[in-house]
Amino acid sequence: MLTKRTKFYQLFSEYFQIALGIILASIGLKAFLLPNGFLDGGVTGIAILLNSQFDINVSLLLVVFSIPFLILGYYTVSKRIVIKSILSILGLALFIHFENFQTITEDKLLISIFGGLFVGAGIGIAIRNGSVLDGSEILGIFINDRFGVSIGKVILVFNVILFSVTAFVISTEIAMYSILTYIITAKVTDLIIEGFEDFIGVTIVSKDYEKIKTAIITELGAGITVYKGRIGFGSTGEIEDFDIIHTIINRIDIKKMYRVISNIDDSAFIVEFDVNNVKGGVLRHYLNRKKNKKLITHPLKNS
């Protein structure tokens, strides 16, 4: 019974958040972009462009142009995502059709910024809960699966074509403001999906690895993973049987980490790399510095 209740709450939470995403995206469109003829990227942008030229209902265009992508999604992603996406796109179309916001501002820069903020927040919340409000993401997933081209590049090419047509059909100025809107939308979407924390991975090789391991845990409060190195060659000569330290920390702590390592071994070899996604472990809740003075070197505990 408890399991069913938990599943119900999870399902309710997902659809409630998707509904919130739909409302935010529709506010961005009806209160900012649509009254001023500004475009967003993807299918929504196509619908707005055709509406500006042929005065066809945007909601109808949004649904019609989403159908091919949803069919494509049926063979690309899970049926559950497709069902959620159908409901989300229909919900967005209905909100756009029935909402009647007054134009908040006529300042073109503010329209681009706040339109992008609302639409990006809506798309990001929907994606976090397993749905899409724009079919171009599904196209990106499909092409990535079939041809190995990154999703970001597919969407970028899609929108470059769209904004080029906009510049030719409407005006270069509208196209430029629409590009600004798209950039803000994309950045806000990424922020909502990935969160406000920005983590990076660090790999460290040093002859003073024991001291560095202790310092990372006690001074930074970060977990570590230790790999055994058999032999290495460098400016200091040959090193045998050493530990390779791997950790993931918040980007704001990277300067402190460099200072900590430099105080122990200023010639340590350090590799820094971006981390796209992390799950589990002690990463998001840094080790309590007061309670974790003992060195922890169990593999894979920090990621």
Image: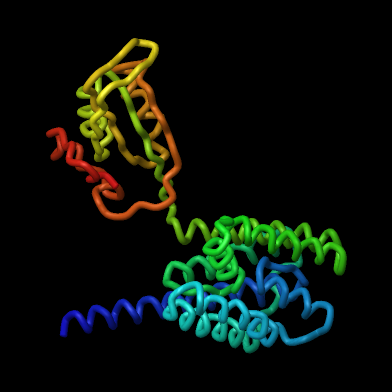
Closest to the observer, 110 or 3: 3
In the rendered image, the residue lying farthest to the front is: 146
Q: Quadrant of residue 8?
A: bottom left
Position in image of residue 110 (x %, y %): 69, 61
Position in image of residue 165 (x %, y %): 81, 65
Q: Which residue is pictured at 46% across the width and 61% down the height? A: 193
Q: Which residue is pictured at 22% across the width and 83% down the height? A: 5
Q: Looking at the picture, does residue 223 appear above or below residue 17?
A: above
Tally of marks: 0
Q: Which residue is pictured at 64% across the width and 56% down the height? A: 183
Q: Quadrant of residue 260?
A: top left
Closest to the observer, 12 or 118: 12
Position in image of residue 209 (x %, y %): 24, 23
In the rendered image, the residue lying farthest to the top is: 236
Q: Quadrant of residue 29?
A: bottom right
- Render colour scheme: rainbow
Closest to the observer, 103 or 96: 96
Decide if residue 235 is on the left or right side of residue 42: left
Q: Quadrant of the N terminus?
A: bottom left
Closest to the observer, 24 or 284: 284
Position in image of residue 268 (x %, y %): 35, 20
Decide if residue 171 is on the left or right side of residue 126: right
Q: Which residue is pictured at 31% across the width and 77% down the height? A: 10
Decide if residue 59 is on the left or right side of residue 9: right
Q: Looking at the picture, does residue 130 appear above or below residue 56?
A: above
